[in-house]
Image: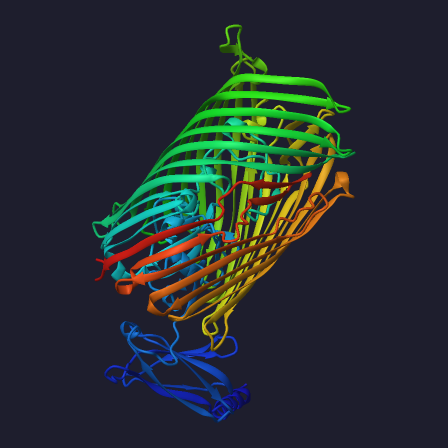
């Protein structure tokens, strides 16, 4: 043993002596050449930016790092208040020594000096958050946050302002972590200036209770947070613009902001009929109930969605989606403040909107049946109006060092008037006419909501021991009434066999009230592990009263049609409890657990007195795992399981005749479905090479899936009913790779999307399985040269295929190509020329031989005035080639449809906009 120790003692010094490589140098200040002590010196491998070793400078500002293997390295020097310094060096052999003398400059001088060999990380990965340093991306004066987002790797912004980050649509935009006018992301991205933003953060926002306990409860919203610079939070700023043009088009906007320390007051107003602003309220999911998940792909929105036909009295969701000609008048107020050493804060928003949408559309569809095909051609004229009000507030108080309270409230009122006229004809495979329908529907409706919650959080002396109580209330009321006038003709051998006339007055009153309580307790088991217990009660009471009245002898609508009338009450009571185990280590985070709910249903038919009662056990298992390879590379896996109960629309045995050719009936024997979702996320970013990789994939499979059973008779009538099946599943994957081309101002990226779904349903009692896929490969390139140009190009190719088992010889396969170039030229005398193009090329299909290729070309020419180019006068032309015909193609379980619709086409607009601001000083 002594001999072994002696040998080791002799060998180790020899090995160390053989490795005589080193890097040494000093760190000084560029301003006064002062030696900087305690500066962090990191050595990274040049090939992959992995940290090799690090040290700090001594009192004299010197450093010395020994025993590095021969190779190529990067030296990174960082000190508080100074810009980062990066320099490459090479150790050629085992005796080489590199000398690196570092000169650091204060960040405050960055705008005044040209720094050599300096690099600030453009992107950082902080836990589950991707953070972009806004100043790393060169922007023109008065550029908006939306302009900035278009330059950030991994983020795309479409023509409607919809943001996609790492393949997922962003649902919420925050400013300094707070709500900014609630649910409309474009109010922040299109009105705040890019030079106000310090950091852009992208992450999955958890529920307040999950954020407090650290336990994933399955509630996640893709969120983008704008962190403002400290010196931009004192003063005022805003934007005023107005424009008028040909064909009666006009656009006027105003945004005013007053910031003083932690108090923010903002207001906006918009009057426009260009279809580009003031329309992006994202509240459809908060109203009504979800439908059966019949997955179909809509190329207009590049998404799959659930489809189950609902009552036409509730058909319009009160938003503008590109169809028709809109006129919007909207405005809002925002207030946010913190006081009492940030122990108390309040955030409030109010918005009001009036929206008018008129237009028309035509749709051609091909339906697959087990033994034949048939086609429908339909058209619609519509004139819709809505007045909408929304308000919300959040109050936070830190009661003491261990207790906090959050109170939230939001509510809204909608008053909706819709007028629609439909014409539909169905044609058999031999081109013979099957039926023809004309109907008019006129509806007036009011929707009111009131939601509130109280979250109490308690931290105990023992680190990790917490207790929280969350109480939520949600109330929705829907009242509507209207008239249905319909004439249907049924044909046989080219002649009218029979007709059906409907002339009815309809009323609909529904209410839903939900109380949800949840108590959560966490107990640490060690420094890295803890267990979390929770228990809650959910009470959900719904009522639905729909009545249809025929005319009496005197012409009044007083005779109740009992076949198309009903009155139901639907009460649900759930006990819910669960446990989970949580582990947090330096690089690893893991969580596993489950919730179980004991649910009792009580359904009463108020007309017949019939009562149905059912009891179910609902399971909600969860598991997650994440691993941090290093500060810039991470991998996470998540699993969520959930039991979803059928809603009242699917259960109640109610017939509706609002569309006589499409009848929906309820299924009181529906069982709950159980959904499993597995998600994998990987990201990797190399700071010095500015190269990023994002991969996001999810797989969902459902047992007892609630799907549709469609029966089509010889007259072309479709009867739809929700039923349970097995075998539904879908898969989604996004992969993105982006990088900065070295020694240029160009950034480039590649991305790929894959969507696949297997959907099972019944068509004329035959079990039908539809396999659909949508595969996209794309790239982007953007670059700029200060005061000369900005260029960008997005291009993608998409292949869509779909085939159903009931008609295996009929397959839908087609390509779609999309090109989006854009150019900004900055000319002398403060002149600017902008042009962008959206080129869509669609392949013909067997069902539709028109490809509807579209080239949307927009351009504007402007001149800037005043200090900092604050005033812009421009002449813009929308759709120069007048090709915006309005087109979409939809692939569903057993049909494909193609729609043309009226939409805004060519117009010219002369506008003037003024950006003003007076900000400065530090926020206090």
| Foreground of the two, 550 or 64 | 550
The scheme the figure's colours follow is: rainbow
Q: Compared to 396, does 543 lie above or below?
A: above
Q: Compared to 554, does 420 lie above or below?
A: below
- Total of numbered circles in the picture? 0
Camera sees residue 426: yes
| Foreground of the two, 375 or 697 | 375
The quadrant of the picture occupied by the C terminus is: bottom left
Location of residue 354 (image quadrant): top left
The quadrant of the picture occupied by the N terminus is: bottom right
Q: Compared to 511, does 791 lie above or below?
A: below
Q: Percent from the top left, x then y, of residue 296?
A: 62, 42
| Foreground of the two, 795 or 509 | 795
Q: Percent from the top left, x then y, of residue 882?
A: 52, 50
Camera sees residue 666: no
| Foreground of the two, 624 or 79 | 79
Residue drawn where x is 48% and y is 94% of the image:
95
- Return the residue found at the far front: 246
Location of residue 230 (image quadrant): bottom left
Q: Compared to 35, does 373 lie above or below?
A: above
Location of residue 724 (image quadrant): top right
Q: Percent from the top left, x then y, of residue 38?
A: 30, 78
Q: Percent from the top left, x then y, of residue 606?
A: 51, 15
């Amino acid at each position: 043993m002594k001999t072994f120790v002696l040998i080791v003692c002799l060998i180790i010094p020899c090995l160390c002596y053989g490795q005589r490589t080193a890097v040494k140098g000093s760190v000084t200040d560029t301003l006064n050449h002062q030696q900087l002590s305690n500066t962090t010196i990191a050595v990274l491998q040049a090939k992959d930016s992995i940290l090799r070793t690090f040290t700090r400078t001594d009192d004299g500002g010197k450093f010395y790092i020994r025993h590095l293997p021969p190779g190529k390295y990067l030296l990174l020097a960082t000190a508080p208040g100074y810009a980062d310094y990066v320099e490459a060096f090479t150790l050629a052999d085992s005796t080489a020594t590199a000398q690196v003398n570092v000169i650091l400059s204060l960040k405050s001088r960055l705008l005044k000096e040209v720094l050599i060999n300096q690099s600030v990380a453009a992107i950082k990965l902080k836990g589950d958050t991707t953070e972009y340093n806004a100043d790393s991306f060169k922007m023109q004066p008065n550029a908006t946050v939306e302009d900035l987002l278009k330059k950030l790797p991994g983020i795309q912004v479409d023509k409607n302002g919809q943001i996609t980050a790492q393949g997922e649509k962003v649902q919420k935009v925050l400013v300094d972590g707070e709500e900014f006018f609630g649910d409309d992301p474009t109010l922040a991205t299109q009105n705040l200036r890019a030079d106000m933003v310090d950091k852009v953060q992208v992450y999955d926002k958890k529920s307040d209770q999950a954020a407090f306990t650290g336990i994933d409860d399955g509630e996640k919203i893709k969120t983008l947070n704008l962190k403002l610079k400290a010196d931009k939070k004192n003063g005022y700023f805003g934007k005023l613009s107005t424009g008028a043009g040909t064909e009666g088009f006009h656009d006027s906007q105003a945004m005013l902001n007053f910031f003083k320390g932690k108090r923010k007051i903002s207001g906006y107003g918009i009057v426009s009929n260009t279809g580009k602003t003031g329309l992006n309220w994202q509240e459809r999911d908060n109203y009504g109930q979800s439908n059966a998940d019949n997955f179909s792909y809509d190329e207009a929105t590049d998404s799959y969605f659930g489809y189950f036909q609902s009552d036409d009295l509730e058909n319009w969701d009160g938003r503008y989606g590109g169809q028709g000609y809109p006129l919007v008048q909207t405005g809002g107020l925002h207030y946010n403040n913190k006081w009492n050493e940030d122990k108390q804060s309040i955030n409030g928003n109010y918005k009001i909107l009036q929206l008018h949408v008129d237009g028309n559309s035509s749709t051609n569809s091909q339906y697959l049946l087990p033994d034949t095909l048939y086609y429908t051609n339909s058209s619609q004229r519509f004139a819709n109006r809505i007045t909408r009000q929304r308000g919300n507030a959040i109050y936070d108080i830190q009661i003491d060092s261990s207790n906090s309270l959050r109170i939230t409230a939001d509510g809204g009122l909608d008053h909706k008037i819709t007028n629609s006229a439909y014409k539909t004809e169905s044609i058999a495979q031999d081109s013979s006419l099957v039926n023809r329908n004309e109907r008019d529907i006129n509806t007036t409706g009011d929707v009111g909501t009131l939601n509130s919650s109280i979250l109490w959080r308690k931290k105990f002396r023992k680190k990790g021991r917490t207790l929280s109580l969350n109480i939520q209330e949600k109330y929705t009321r829907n009242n509507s009434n209207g008239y249905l006038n319909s004439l249907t003709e049924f044909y046989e051998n080219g002649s009218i066999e029979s007709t059906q006339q409907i002339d009815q007055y309809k009323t609909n009153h529904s209410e839903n009230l939900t109380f949800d309580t949840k108590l959560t307790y966490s107990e640490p088991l060690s420094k890295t592990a803890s267990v979390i217990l929770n228990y809650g009660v959910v009470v959900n009471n719904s009522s639905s009263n729909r009545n249809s009245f025929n005319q009496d002898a005197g012409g009044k609508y007083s005779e109740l049609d009992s076949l198309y009338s009903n009155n139901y009450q639907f009460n649900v009571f759930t006990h819910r409890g669960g446990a989970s185990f949580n582990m947090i280590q330096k690089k690893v985070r893991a969580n596993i657990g489950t919730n179980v709910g004991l649910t009792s249903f009580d359904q009463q038919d108020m007309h017949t007195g019939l009562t149905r009662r059912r009891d179910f056990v609902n399971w909600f298992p969860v598991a997650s795992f994440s691993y941090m390879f290093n500060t810039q590379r991470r991998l996470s896996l998540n699993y969520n399981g959930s039991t979803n109960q059928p809603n009242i629309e699917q259960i109640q045995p109610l017939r509706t005749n609002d569309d006589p050719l499409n009848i929906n009936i309820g299924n009181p024997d529906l069982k709950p479905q159980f959904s499993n979702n597995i998600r994998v996320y990987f990201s990797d970013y190399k700071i010095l090479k500015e190269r990023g990789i994002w991969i996001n994939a999810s797989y969902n499979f459902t047992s007892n899936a609630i799907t549709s059973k469609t029966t089509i008779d010889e007259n072309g009538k479709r009867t739809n009913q929700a039923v349970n099946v097995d075998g539904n599943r879908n898969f989604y994957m996004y992969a993105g790779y982006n990088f900065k081309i070295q020694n240029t101002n160009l950034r480039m990226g590649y991305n790929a999307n894959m969507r696949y779904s297997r959907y099972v349903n019944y068509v004329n009692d035959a079990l039908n399985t539809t396999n659909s896929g949508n595969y996209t490969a794309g790239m982007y390139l953007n670059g700029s040269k200060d005061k000369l140009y900005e260029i960008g190009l997005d291009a993608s190719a998409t292949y869509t295929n779909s085939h159903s088992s009931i008609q295996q010889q009929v397959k839908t396969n087609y390509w779609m190509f999309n090109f989006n170039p854009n150019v900004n030229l900055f000319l002398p005398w403060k002149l600017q020329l902008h042009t962008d193009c959206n080129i869509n090329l669609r392949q013909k299909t067997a069902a539709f031989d028109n490809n509807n290729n579209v080239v949307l070309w927009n351009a504007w020419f402007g001149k800037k005035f005043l200090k900092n180019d604050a005033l812009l006068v421009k002449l813009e032309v929308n759709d120069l080639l007048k090709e915006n015909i309005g087109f979409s193609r939809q692939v569903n379980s057993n049909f494909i449809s193609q729609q043309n619709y009226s939409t805004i086409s060519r117009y010219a607009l002369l506008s003037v906009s003024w950006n003003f601001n007076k900000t400065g000083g530090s926020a206090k």
